[in-house]
Amino acid sequence: MAAPTLTSPELHSSCPVADEVLVERLRSGDQSAFAEIYERYFARVFHFVARRLRNRADTEETVQEVFVNVFASIDSFRGEAPFGAWVFGLTRRTVAGRFKKRMPNLVPLGDDEVESAFHGVAREPDPHEAYEYSERLARIEDAVTSELSDEQRQLFELHHLEHRSIQEIAHLLSKSEDAVKSHLYRARKVLLAR
């Protein structure tokens, strides 16, 4: 699957076709209407799903599932709300379904078993641990601002916070993939040393 494009389809045409017109064209069997809907919503759906799943492969698979659902249930769009809201409602339900599929079958525990099962598993850090965490976080934040170049900071944010692929970042910034990897390696090395 191709990476999301960063250009808006509205830039290609001075008068974009309304979503509702595309829906009607799709309902009448016009496959090019689906291609236009896909192009119009792909990047937004991709980023919405990526922020929730945080895994590129799962994100790509889920986005494809969203658009299959859009195509399969286009007749259920009644136009009571904007088409974009309908698409994102479908997207939310698709993502929720993915989380539901991942849920293991759980066996209910009795009240006395609950306390013993979770005893000591999830606990608040003691004051010493909390202090160490805050100190390490301060050192990492200081390293980000004082030791990373603007370019390294930008690449780190794009890859680790926005979850963009190396290939996508290289294309976006007109750099080679090796250059992106090299800068990310150096940035991680600086931050992990803290």
Image (spheres, rainbow, N blue to C red):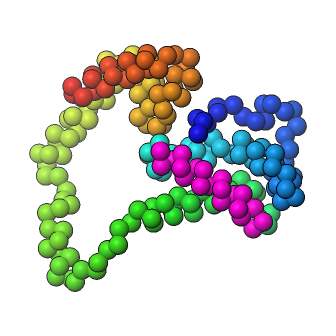
Q: Position of residue 66 (x, y in %)?
A: 62, 55
In the displayed structure, 190 sits above or below 110; it is: above
In the displayed structure, 94 sits above or below 138; it is: below
Q: Quadrant of the C terminus?
A: top left
Q: Is residue 73 magenta?
A: yes
Q: Quadrant of the N terminus?
A: top right
Viewer can see residue 20: no
Residue for point 72% across, 34% down: 8
Viewer can see residue 38: yes
Numbered range of the magenta stretch = 57-76
Q: Nearer the viewer, residue 180 or 82?
A: 180
Q: Is residue 100 magenta?
A: no
Residue for point 56% across, 43% down: 47
Residue for point 14% across, 68% down: 119
Q: Is residue 82 left or right of residue 50?
A: right
Q: Position of residue 5 (x, y in %)?
A: 64, 33
Q: Quarter-wise, where is residue 150 in the image? A: top left
Characterize the magenta stretch by its predominant secondary structure.
helix
Residue for point 39% across, 66% down: 103
Q: Position of residue 10 (x, y in %)?
A: 78, 35
In the displayed structure, 56 sits above or below 172; it is: below
